Structure formats: structure tokens, C-alpha cells
Image (cartoon, rainbow, N blue to C red):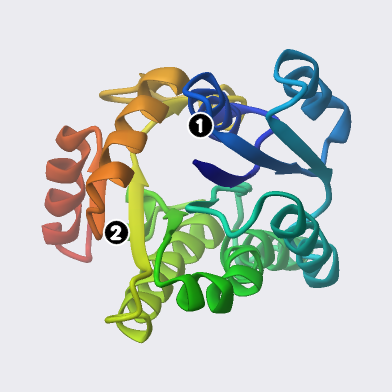
Amino acid sequence: MKVVVTGASSGIGLALARHYLERGATVSAIARRGELLQTLAAEFPDKVFCYALDVRDALAVQQAANNFMARVGVPDIVIANAGVSRGTLTEYAEDIDAFQQVMDINVLGMVKTFQPFVNAMRDARHGKLVGIASVAGFRGLPGAGAYSASKAAAISYLESLRVELRGSGVKVVAICPGYIKTPMTAVNPYSMPFILDADDAAQRMAREIERGCSFTVIPWQMGLVGRAMKLLPNWL
């Protein structure tokens, strides 16, 4: 099996990369922090290809994709996991840059991750494009306008891509995790219900990817929370 994972230097991405490597897969591990990828490289020297790049850089992503496919072939799974979260308030002009960064990485970064592989997967009539969204995309959250909007956009984008690739043999999978113990959530000052550690989350995600589910929430309890959030009146 050949797998591409972005955001592979920590959190969910690292857990997913390690999950597949431990099961014999060849993995393209992509992240901005190349020094952190070297831990994977040392642990799995013959099975992991590390690419230190920013998913906002379409040319760099394309070059990494071409390099990986030239070495091992068309991937079976591409997981667009790279993402950031920033607290944002529209009233502050200085937060505009934060909005831009979050949207560029969480939405356009996903597009740029998938794009180099779509035609190759379509020609092979095989493969899965997996986008890691979030239950935060179900409803806008105060102080998290950029993050919620980016994840809502990611969910809609994955829906569109799924229809575009219908009948091609390429499946599109949207995964919406709830709270996961990662560096991103470590700074949250509030209670996080049904929180999972990254390794547990990665195992659950891998099962759903294997099943080829088009849309899934992990853990399932957060799906109930998400649906309840959508039913809340707007004045709350």
C-alpha cells in the first residue's frame, strides 16, 4: 500500500503516518517542519519518503507528488490532513491575516494536495482522496470564525469533488473528527467532550478509510453533538 499524508510531523498526521508504516505501507510524509519528519525517517528508513514543504506552495506539492509517484507509483490513499487553528475576531484588522492563513492552509492546501494525484488516480481507476475536516464545520463558533468557516468549506469542497469523480474508481472520504489530543488542542482552556488520543483517532480513521465511507464523524458521539449544534437557534 502507498499512502500520502500531509501535516505528518505531529498530531493526527503523525499518528496516521505511523499507523500505515507499522502495517507495511510506503508513506509520503509531508510537513513544514522537516526536522520533525526525521524521527519517522529514522524509525522507518526504507518505507517513508519525507518532504519538508508548505501545502500552500502548489509547485512544491506538485514536485513532491511527482517524485513520490516516480519512485513508488500512484498512491492508494492521499490524506489531506495539514491544518491550523487560530482564534479570530472580525473586529480586529490584524486578524485578517489570520483568516487568510487558516483558509489558505485548511481549504486551498487540501485542493493543492489532491490536485497532483487526481488524473493519475483516475487513469488507474483506483484510490482514495481523504480530507480531514472537523465537527467545527457544522456550525460557526464564536472566536473561531476562520477555523469553522474553513472546515465548512472543506466539507463542501469534498462533497463537490466526490460528485466530480463519481464513476472514476476514485473515492472521496470526508472525516470530521471531534476533539483529539494534539498540540493544536493542548492550548484549549475549555472542556473537550469525548476527546481521543491521536493514536486511537488514527486507528478509527483508518478503519473508515478502509470501508470507503463517504462521510464520517469520529468519535460517533460527536456526530450527535454536531447535529444538535445545527439545531440550536441563532440567538444562542
Residue beneath disc 2:
138
Task: Indicate the quadrant containing the C terminus: top left, top right, bottom left or bottom right.
Answer: bottom left
Provide residue 103's location: percent of width, then percent of height.
62, 66
Cα separation, mark 2 vs mark 1, equals 24 Å
Q: Which quarter of the picture shows residue 57?
A: bottom right
Q: In the displayed image of the protein, which residue is found farthest to the top? A: 43
Query: Which circle, 2 or 1, is nearer the viewer?
Result: 1
Nearer-the-camera pick, 83 or 171 = 171
Residue ID at (55%, 48%): 81
Residue 140 or 196: which is nearer the viewer? Answer: 196
Q: Is residue 109 left or right of residue 172?
A: right
Q: Is mark 1 on a helix, strand or loop?
A: helix
Q: Is mark 2 on a helix, strand or loop?
A: helix
Contact (CB < 8 A) between labels 2 and 1?
Answer: no
Q: Determine whether 216 is above or below 169 in the image.
A: above
Q: Is residue 41 visible?
A: yes
| Residue at the bottom extreme, as displayed | 164
- The amino acid type, in three-letter code, at marker 1 is Leu
Q: Position of residue 55 (x, y in %)?
A: 73, 59
Q: Nearer the viewer, residue 112 or 73?
A: 73
Residue to which mark 1 is pinned:
16
Residue 116 has which mark? none
Which quadrant would residue 89 be assigned to in this image? bottom right
**Amino acid bearing label 2:** Phe
Residue 3 locus on image (x, y percent): 55, 45
